[in-house]
Amino acid sequence: MFEEYFVAKKRLYPQSAKGKFRKLKSLLNFVFLSIYFCSPFLRFGRGDGAPNQAILIDISNSKVYFFGIEIWPQEVYYLMGILVIAAVTLFFITSLFGRIWCGYACFQTVWTDIFIGLEKIFQGDRNDRILLDRKNNFKKFWRKCLTHLSWIIVSILTGYSFVCYFCDSISFTKNIFHGEISLHSLGWILGIAGMTYIMAGFAREHVCTFMCPYSRFQSAMFDNNTLIISYDTKRGEPRGKMSHNADFNKRGHCIDCKQCVVVCPTGIDIRNGLQMECIACGLCVDACNNIMDKVGLPRGLIRYDTINHLIDPKPEKKFKLLQPRTLYYTAILLVVCALLLKSLISKSTLEIAAIPDRNPLFVTLSDGSIRNGYQIKISNKTHEKKSFSLKISQPTEAILKMQNLDLSHLEVSPDEVGTFKVFVIMPAEKIAQNTEGRGLIEFIISDEKDEKKVSAVFISK
Ligand code: SF4
Ligand code: SF4
């Protein structure tokens, strides 16, 4: 009963395609790989003492740097905002253009395409690879060795670039050349390299079909106006082999050459209708267009089209970029982007937190006044040393005390969180007015430019 789920899939030998979608895919591969490999080497001046790497995930200091933007651990909501924007953009693009993310931009597709390209360089195109795999000889041995060697080099470079996002890429690279690399970094490079080698070299289309959750639910975002890879059944069927006296007025235009199948990186036959495995890469469109050119028939037997236009091929049923969902997705994106931008622009470089002592909650002094202890944490998010002044704004009767330090001169190093122990003493008369035994203290911290307030509970019972 379950055998069909466990049948081993046939090994695929995708043939290289020629055409505009292949060119677009190669161009995008180049752009994405250039971004991935070069980004860690971009520099961005942030002043003395701050890292000058434009994109850096600084795990040891729990900070993320992206050009002029710096995200501290307590600002993780910015990352959430970016993720929301990425998700809405992905849903938006999918609902309009189908799975073009999978076909052109997903890292699994990009790396698999590079690995297939390397396979072609060292072992030849589809037919050469099939013939090579049928024999066991020295030619097969060295061609396979070169293929795997090139895959391993690309995988290690991928792992190395990944680690470069988490440390200073230039000193890390220099250290590697001097043979100095920590076991931790080496582990990450090898881990990512191993994953790349397996996923792009062997797992390939199985990742898209069986492992990627996105492929499972994205068809829920499709409707009859979504641009999908479509085989024009009305025009193509009944299919038949090409013959010299073929009369295409009396039969379908598909000559059953299977070129659309052999170029497909997921090994499907799009003539059977849209399938979950289809990543909308458009390579079958190129392959079929080349065949149509050869037999003198119009292009577009396989094309990006909408179901509505396939059913009713009138010009007004063609894909329209301006649809109601374009408007509401754009509106959602604009709102989220505007909110994120506003909060980034108005982001303060000063944060304060007041944490009351838990033990003891309060201390009664000899004159009847009550003392509470607090830890004041001041985050100096600038790249220069700052001096702050700490006061209590409410209630005015409260007295602020600190051991050994001047309250008007609390120094915090650049990019650091300064922690200061303070005591607040509430006079007995004020305590007597508060029968609940709880009140609020409002601290105010300021430097020459900025001012922040924070409240903390004061316990007297
Ligand atoms: S059917 Fe066509 S578009 Fe879909 S994955 Fe295969 S080649 Fe790419
Ligand atoms: S490439 Fe075009 S003509 Fe050839 S089998 Fe596929 S759909 Fe038919």
Image (tube, rainbow, N blue to C red):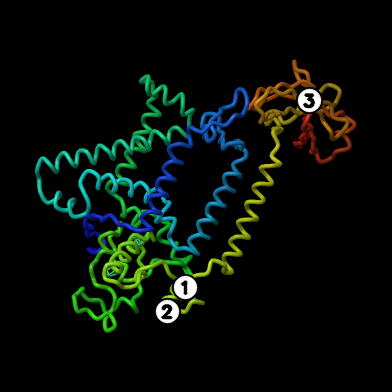
Image coordinates of residue 418 in percent, x first then y, are 67, 25
What mark, if any, has residue 224 been given in the picture?
1
Near mark 3 (Cα within 10 A), the count class, few <14, some 14-19 or many ≥20, is: some
Distance between the Cα atoms at labels 2 and 3? 73 Å
Disc 2 packing (10 Å; few <14; some 14–19; many ≥20):
few
Is 301 rendered above or below residue 27?
A: below
Q: Secondary structure at mark 2?
A: helix
User: Quick one: label 3 or label 1, which is nearer the N terminus?
Assistant: 1
Of the 4 image quadrants, the one containing the N terminus is bottom left
- Residue 162 seen in the figure: yes
Question: Which-is-in-front pick, marks 3 and 1?
Answer: 1
Q: Earlier in the sequence, mark 1 or mark 2?
A: 1
The part of the image, by quadrant, that contains residue 19 is bottom left
Q: Which quarter is ligand 2 in?
A: bottom left
The amino acid type found where label 3 is placed reads Ser
Query: Label 3, label 1: how many angstroms apart (C-alpha)?
Result: 63 Å
Q: Earlier in the sequence, mark 2 or mark 3?
A: 2
Identify which amino acid the numbered label 2 is placed on: Ile
Which residue, given by chain and number where applicable, does mark 3 sit on?
389
Indicate the quadrant containing the C terminus: top left, top right, bottom left or bottom right: top right
Q: Position of residue 374 (x, y in %)?
A: 72, 29
For image coordinates 59% across by 48% down, the residue present is 81
Separation of disc 1 and disc 2 at Cα?
Answer: 10 Å
Tell me the number on the disc at residue 264: none
Q: Which mark is residue 311?
A: 2
Q: Residue at x 30, y 69 (%)?
A: 292
Q: Residue furthest bottom?
A: 250
**Depicted 424 relative to depicted 142: above or below:** above
Front position among marks 2 and 3: 2
